[in-house]
C-alpha cells in the first residue's frame, strides 16, 4: 500500500510562550520544533501498515526550510521519501493548504492519505476533509483505530464511551488522533541514512487565503496567586485542611 | 441571509447550536436555520429564525459527512446564504469543511470573537488548544464560520421568528454515502471517567515510572477520583493514552485536580484549565504549574503522597 502522510512542523512550546515584536507569531528563538502530535502518530501508522503489507510511505509538509528536520525524522523512522512545499509565508489557511497539497500530489497515486485530525497550532480541523472532497475520495476523521479488510479501511473513532465505525473503500483520506499508536524513536542507523536521503523541494508561490492571518493574542492572565501550603511532608496537615475546605474529604 | 446549521441530540437542540444561533443576528438580514434529518422547529423561534430549511432525505438520519457536506453545499448555493454559522463541534467542522471544499469557500473554525466590517468578518480563533488566540479576517462570499460554544452564551433574539418549515430537496447519489457511519460499538467504562470525575489525580515526568502510579491509584481510590497523566507519562508508556490530560488527550473539569510531578506545559494546562482548583505538587519551585495552580506544595511527591495517604486513611477510618 502506498501512503501519503501530511505533517506540520510546530514549535515545542513548553510552559510559556512569548510573541514576536509584531505579534504575528510565537517567538521561537529559544524553542525546538517537533512534528505536530496527531501527525507524528500518522507517520507511525503509515510505517506500521507498510511494514505489514509492503508499499512506500511519502511524507509531505508545507513550511519553511527548517521543516526538512521533521521530514528527515520521518525518514529516519521508516518513511521512504519526503516532499517539502517550501514557504516562509504564515498565511496558509486550510483552503490554501488543501490546494497546495492537491497540486503537489495530483500526478501521484496513493492508496491512502493520512493526516492529523487537527494541527497542534492552528487547529482548523479542515485540511483532511477538504483534500478528500477535492480528490473525490471517502474520508474519516479523528480515527483512533485503523485496520484493513477486503481492500477497505475500517476506521474507528471514539464517541464518548463508544466507537463509531466507518468502512472506506480505498483510496481514502483518514485523519488520526494521538493514541492510535505509540510512535517509535528513530534508530541511529535510520538517523544516519536520513541525513543523506534526497528530499524533493518545491518552492511555493504566495498563498491566496480566504481567511487572512492578522496576528496572535495571548490570553488574559487571571492574576490569581498560588497559595503555597508548605514544603515536603510537613505540608500534609495543610493539604488535608485544603481538601476538607474544598469538600472532597 | 444568514444560515445557521443546527444540530440535535436525542431530539433536542444542542446547547452548542443555541450558541451558534445567538451570533447570527450580528450579520444582518434574515436568519434561516438548516437541519439534517428530523428537526424540532418550535425551539428555533426564540432565536429569531424565520425559516427552517429541512433537508428531506432520510438517509441523512445516520451520520454521513460526505453526503451531509454535499447537502449543505447545495442549500448554501440555492438559498444564496452569505454567512453560514454553526457550533464548532467535530461533526459540524467536518461537514462544513466538505461543503467549503465543494464551493471553494473560506471557513473559519472555532471562533471566539466576531465582528462585521463591511465585506469582511474580523474574528478571533482559539488555537493551541485554547492557550493562544489567532486574529484573522474572513473574506469572500459565502463565509463559513463555526463558533466555540464556550465563548458565546446562548441568547435569545429581541423578536422571535416564525420558524416556518420549508422542505428543501437535495440531489444525493448513493455514492455520496460511501463514508457513512457503518456501526457503533459499545465501549466498556471502567472506573470513574476522567472527563467527568469530581476529583482527578494526575502524574507527570516526576512520577519516574509506571509503578509509581500505584500511589496515585491509592489516593484516587480514597477520594473517589480518577487517575490521569501528562503527555510525558503517556508517551513513556507509564499510562495508556486514554488517561492523558491535555490538548491531545482528555479535557477535565473536576472540583479538585491534584497535579503531581507535572511541570505545567501548555499542552497539559489546556486540558485541565477548567478545574475549579489545582493543587500542584512539584519539587521545582520554578515549574510553570505554580503560576497556574490555586494551591502549591514544594517537594518530592514520593515523600508527600505516602504521608498524605496515611492521613486520609485516618480520616476515612480505613
Image (cartoon, coloured by chain):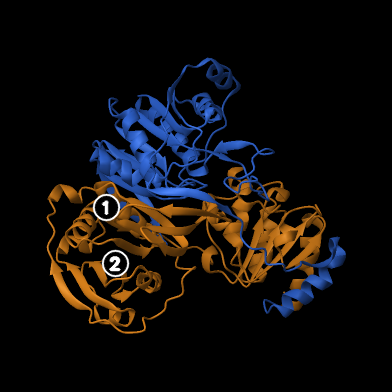
Chain colours: A blue, B orange
> At 33% across and 70% down in the image, what residue appears?
B28
Where residue B12 appears, as percent x and y from the top left, is 31, 76
**Left-right relation of B233 to B56:** right
Taking the image as drawn, is residue A101 in sight?
Answer: yes
Of residues A172 and B209, which is closer to you in this image? Answer: A172
Judged from the image, the secondary structure of the residue bearing numbered disc 1 is helix
- Relative to A197, does residue A14 appear above or below in the rendering? below
Mark 2 Cα-neighbour bin, 10 Å: few <14, some 14–19, many ≥20: many
The disc at residue B2 is 2
Q: How far apart are marks 1 and 2 (CA)?
A: 16 Å
Image quadrant where one finds the C terminus of chain B: bottom right
Judged from the image, the secondary structure of the residue bearing numbered disc 2 is strand
The disc at residue B281 is none
Residue placed furthest toward the bottom: B159
Q: Name the residue under label 1.
A: B99
Circle 2 marks a residue in which chain?
B
Where residue B261 appears, as percent x and y from the top left, is 72, 53
Circle 1 marks a residue in which chain?
B
- Relative to B144, does residue A65 appear above or below in the rendering? above
**Left-right relation of B78 to B207:** left
Amino acid at each position: 500500500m502506498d501512503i501519503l502522510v501530511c505533517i506540520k512542523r510546530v514549535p515545542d512550546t513548553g510552559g510559556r510562550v512569548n510573541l514576536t515584536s509584531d505579534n504575528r507569531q510565537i517567538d521561537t528563538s529559544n524553542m525546538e520544533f517537533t512534528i505536530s502530535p496527531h501527525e507524528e502518530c500518522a507517520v507511525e501508522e503509515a510505517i506500521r501498515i507498510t511494514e505489514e503489507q509492503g508499499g512506500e510511505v511519502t511524507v509531505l509538509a508545507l513550511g519553511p526550510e527548517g521543516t526538512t528536520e521533521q521530514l528527515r525524522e520521518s525518514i529516519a523512522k521508516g518513511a521512504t521519501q519526503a516532499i517539502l512545499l517550501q514557504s516562509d509565508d504564515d498565511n496558509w489557511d486550510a483552503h490554501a493548504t488543501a490546494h497546495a497539497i492537491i497540486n503537489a500530489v495530483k500526478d501521484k497515486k496513493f492508496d491512502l492519505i493520512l493526516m492529523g485530525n487537527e494541527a497542534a497550532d492552528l487547529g482548523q480541523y479542515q485540511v483532511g476533509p477538504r483534500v478528500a472532497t477535492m480528490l473525490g475520495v471517502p474520508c474519516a476523521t479523528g480515527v483512533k483505530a485503523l485496520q484493513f479488510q477486503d481492500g477497505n479501511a475500517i476506521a474507528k473513532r471514539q464517541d464518548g464511551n463508544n466507537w463509531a465505525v466507518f468502512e472506506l473503500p480505498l483510496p481514502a483520506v483518514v485523519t488520526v488522533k494521538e493514541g492510535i499508536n505509540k510512535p517509535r524513536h528513530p534508530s541511529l542507523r535510520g538517523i544516519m541514512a536520513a541525513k543523506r536521503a534526497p528530499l524533493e523541494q518545491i518552492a511555493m508561490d504566495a498563498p491566496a487565503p480566504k481567511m487572512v492571518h492578522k496576528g496572535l493574542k495571548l490570553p488574559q492572565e487571571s492574576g490569581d496567586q498560588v497559595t503555597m501550603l508548605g514544603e515536603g511532608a510537613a505540608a500534609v496537615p495543610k493539604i488535608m485542611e485544603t481538601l476538607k475546605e474544598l469538600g472532597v474529604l | 441571509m444568514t444560515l445557521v446549521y443546527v444540530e440535535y441530540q436525542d431530539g433536542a437542540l444542542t446547547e452548542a447550536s443555541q450558541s451558534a444561533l445567538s451570533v447570527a443576528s450580528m450579520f444582518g438580514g434574515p436568519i434561516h436555520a438548516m437541519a439534517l434529518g428530523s428537526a424540532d422547529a418550535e425551539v428555533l423561534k426564540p432565536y429569531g429564525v424565520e425559516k427552517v430549511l429541512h433537508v428531506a432525505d432520510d438517509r441523512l438520519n445516520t451520520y454521513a459527512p460526505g453526503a451531509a457536506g454535499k447537502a449543505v453545499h447545495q442549500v448554501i448555493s440555492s438559498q444564496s446564504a452569505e454567512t453560514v454559522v454553526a457550533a464548532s463541534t467535530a461533526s459540524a467542522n467536518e461537514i462544513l469543511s466538505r461543503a467549503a471544499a465543494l464551493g471553494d469557500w473560506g471557513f473559519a473554525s472555532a471562533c471566539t470573537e466576531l465582528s462585521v466590517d463591511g465585506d469582511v468578518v474580523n474574528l478571533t480563533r482559539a488555537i493551541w488548544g485554547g492557550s493562544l488566540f489567532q486574529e484573522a479576517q474572513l473574506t469572500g462570499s459565502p463565509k463559513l464560520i463555526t463558533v466555540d460554544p464556550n465563548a458565546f452564551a446562548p441568547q435569545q433574539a429581541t423578536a422571535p421568528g416564525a420558524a416556518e418549515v420549508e422542505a428543501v430537496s437535495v440531489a444525493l447519489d448513493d455514492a455520496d454515502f460511501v463514508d457513512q457511519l457503518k456501526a457503533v460499538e459499545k465501549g466498556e467504562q471502567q472506573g470513574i471517567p476522567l472527563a467527568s470525575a469530581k476529583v482527578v489525580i494526575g502524574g507527570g515526568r516526576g512520577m519516574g515510572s509506571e509503578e509509581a502510579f500505584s500511589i496515585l491509584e491509592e489516593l484516587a481510590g480514597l477520594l473517589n477520583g480518577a487517575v490521569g497523566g501528562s503527555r510525558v507519562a503517556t508517551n513513556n508508556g507509564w499510562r495508556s493514552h486514554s488517561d492523558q490530560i491535555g490538548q491531545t488527550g482528555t479535557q477535565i473539569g473536576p472540583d479538585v485536580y491534584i497535579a503531581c510531578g507535572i511541570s505545567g506545559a501548555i499542552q497539559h494546562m489546556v486540558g485541565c484549565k477548567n478545574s475549579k482548583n489545582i493543587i500542584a505538587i512539584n519539587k521545582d519551585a520554578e515549574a510553570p504549574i505554580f503560576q497556574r495552580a490555586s494551591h502549591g506544595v514544594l517537594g518530592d511527591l514520593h515523600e508527600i503522597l505516602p504521608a498524605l495517604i496515611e492521613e486520609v486513611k485516618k480520616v476515612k477510618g480505613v
